[in-house]
Amino acid sequence: MLLKEGQVRIPSGCAIAGILNQQGEGFDGGKIISCIANMHQRSNGLGGGFAAYGIYPEFKEHYALHIYFDCKETRANCESYLNKNFNIRLQEPVPVRKHERIKDAPIIWRYFAQPKEEKLAYEQLEESEFTARAVMHINAVIPGAFVASSGHNMGAFKGVGYPEDMGEFFRLEEYKAYLWTAHGRFPTNTPGWWGGAHPFTLLDWSLVHNGEISSYDTNLRFLQMYGYRCTLQTDTEVIAYSFDLLMRKRGLSLDETIHVIAAPFWRDINEEKVKRLRRVYASLLLNGPFSIIVATGNGLVAVNDRIKLRPLVAARKNEFLYVASEEAAIRVVESNPDEVWSPGGGEPVIGLLNGREKLLDIPQCNGPAARTA
Amino acid sequence: MARSIMTPAFKIERDEDRCIQCGVCVRQCANDVHHQDEDGWMWVDDEKCVACQRCAVLCPTRALSIKEYPIDFRSNQHWTSPTIREIYAQAESGGVLLTGMGNPRSYKNFFDHLLLNASQVTNPSIDPLREPMELTTYLGNKSQNGSEGEKPQLELDIPIMFSAMSFGSVSINVQKSLAAAARELGTFWNTGEGGLHSDLLGYGKGAIVQIASGRFGVHPDYLENSAAIEIKIGQGAKPGIGGHLPGEKVSQEVSRARMIPAWSDAISPAPHHDIYSIEDLAQLIETLKVATRYRKPIAVKVAAVHNISAIASGVVRAGADILVIDGFRGGTGAAPMRIRDNVGIPIEMALAQVDSRLRDEGIRSQASLVVTGGIRNSADVLKSIALGADAVYIATAALLALGCHMCQMCFTGKCNWGIATTRADLTKRLNPIIGSRHAINLLTAWSHEIKEMMGGMGINAVESLRGNRLMLRGIGLTREELDLLGVKPAGE
């Protein structure tokens, strides 16, 4: 029997795309769907998905939890955990439409929740760390439940299928987001599992990724020291947690973080500080081919591995920033961009909402690190 | 005097048709095996032969060959020839059996049961001829948060260093060869517990200086004139016991380097007499850090023994910046044979367990992990790194590069290759310029091989291989062994 994602490590090739409106004005999912659909051959129907930012303005103080369940008993089980730990303002099924090519969808609900004060006091944690641990707890400990996304004013919509079908299934034309990312997956050996599709998310982070990290086990075993539980055994999960550790927990800037994950060659490093970062976080160098788009509520960064073994193209048109695996995917939605370029290895494309200075607003972090509950 | 009840171990065959009676063999053999009378007639004393091959290699007409003695005992699977010989030797001498170099027994070699990965299709392999391939490695405590400064680090251009071999156990020309090679290669050599010979003062900054239980040659300049300091607690070839350099090897030069009287035995006690527990080790580490004003990493070397994980955790928590583990295949200039062959555990197991344990405790970043003891080639180096090591030390392989022929008689001081001796006439047989060239060649060749294999795995920086056990698969291992090593079986 084929093992599902999480029981076995599955490498995959892929297509990625992202669109940001830097003014923060929302636009519907049609554009990103066209973009990713144009790279149809880069995926094989075993995974597709989207992350959308700015879609829940009326609940922007709440953690929006998108959760997949394999059956209603699992949902009951998970909800009792949620109710113990969170105040839930609204819970409802995520609206979907019937689609001839989307099969075996799980039960998909969303919860707008805030950690209970008394739980935070008891655990001695600030709320983001508390929520991150809760997400990892659900994924690791409640069989059949999977948290697809857990950030503020954002959500992930993903599953097994081609991304354009997934977009229709999730009725993405009904959402308005200022930032969309998308992913079409070409896994090399998987029965397909909804949780394993991209984007991968944690709190406000979302990540779409094309590539296979040769340093996977080195990265994974380093992250495990800091309490991260990598339940999916995917490269993407490891990349997302690397960003989380470096930026949220260690307080590194985006620039510093890029210097860690796509470190320049020693001979090209002149600054002592950059050398030090590479030494200290040697185990978080992501080695091997990748192009990724990491997004938060503040914007996105797209970056390649340090010797650019995967494609990545960027373009600008007025307040719009586009990034994608192929230029064709951008041209299909913006035929006349002001600027198109192909960033070099380890050279990030950064797009932030106007007025934002950082990719991540870091809350006061009082916990030393996530630990196994 | 009556002959020994033993037949000789080796038989020397001289092809009389080839021999030109030049006498090279007579002059080259420090064991007095070869003789030539006034008429030019050659004869041999096989009993003294140690099979070091010096005569056979230097014979200009290839007239000599050395064989195991044809039939020494009737074959027996239990009472093997070495077993019987050892009993004869002890019956004649009443002594502890001495030997040199590492454990030669047929214990399972885990390196030979591990296979490396390579990229196909889903990610590209990287060609080291076209793309940079980085072997640079830093050793030291890296637990600080990048932006707040850093503890002292050793920078290595290749993740391979020369392990501790003291002046006294090896000749000065061995140290000169390795010190020069280390400088050229961008790595480090280790003084061993023998102080620093005055000829090598210029190589001090490239040296890891050792402090062992005898404290030989330790003084403020010795500590200052170094790259790092290594406290030697134990050695893989002889865990649990100290060292003994016989008085006849303690020449004037050795006496000066070690700061002990000439021609007196140099005895390193089994334990450090100021370290009877872990808290004492912590004090010595701190003392050395203070003495060198926190500018040098402090390494602690221990032998791989049964509860190595707990020991390793203690040593790291005691403040060691570099933890060195020496496996049971580790070499020695002299060790009791029973100890060398029966005490300790394989380095592969010790390494895998220690790396996992330090990670489980969340303290792996506090110290670098260096392993040694039987590393034979570049594949062993790579497998060590994938199991979790930051770097390796080699010693036996380096001596082989310098000409050692593995006769395992280092303790006699009569090394015909000028390696394990302090005799001036033998020492000069090893030319340090040629010696260093060979050591450089060896590690240059290994570096090429490592880069080739890393590229095949799609990895272009050695740190991305460290602890990357998914790059390994076990073959011919039990489930339990696989679990202990933390690797999957081939096929999974």
Image: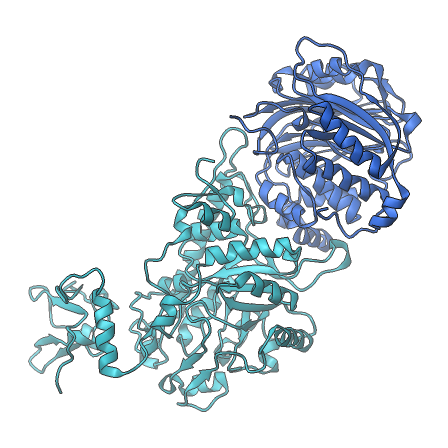
Chain colours: A blue, B cyan
Check the picture and name the quadrant holding the N terminus of chain B: bottom left
Please tell me whether residue A232 is drawn above or below residue B163 in the rendered image: above
Please say whether residue A346 is visible from this viewpoint: no
Residue A259: name its quadrant. Answer: top right
Residue B156 percent location from the top left of the image: 56, 58
Please tell me whether residue B319 is drawn above or below residue B273 in the rendered image: above
Is A16 or A234 nearer to us in this picture?
A: A234
Is A177 or B55 nearer to us in this picture?
A: A177
Residue A12 percent location from the top left of the image: 59, 28
Q: Name which residue lies at 81% across and 39% down.
A: A131
Q: Name which residue lies at 61% across and 37% down.
A: A307
Please say whether residue B441 is visible from this viewpoint: yes
Q: Name which residue lies at 47% across and 53% down.
A: B381
Residue A353 percent location from the top left of the image: 87, 31
Please tell me whether residue A136 is drawn above or below residue B268 in the rendered image: above
Residue A325 percent location from the top left of the image: 67, 24
Is A355 or B484 nearer to us in this picture?
A: B484
Q: Is residue B304 left or right of residue A21?
A: left
Q: Residue furthest top?
A: A100
**Total numbered labels placed on residues in the image:** 0
Is B14 or A119 nearer to us in this picture?
A: A119
Q: Is residue B480 left or right of residue A346?
A: left
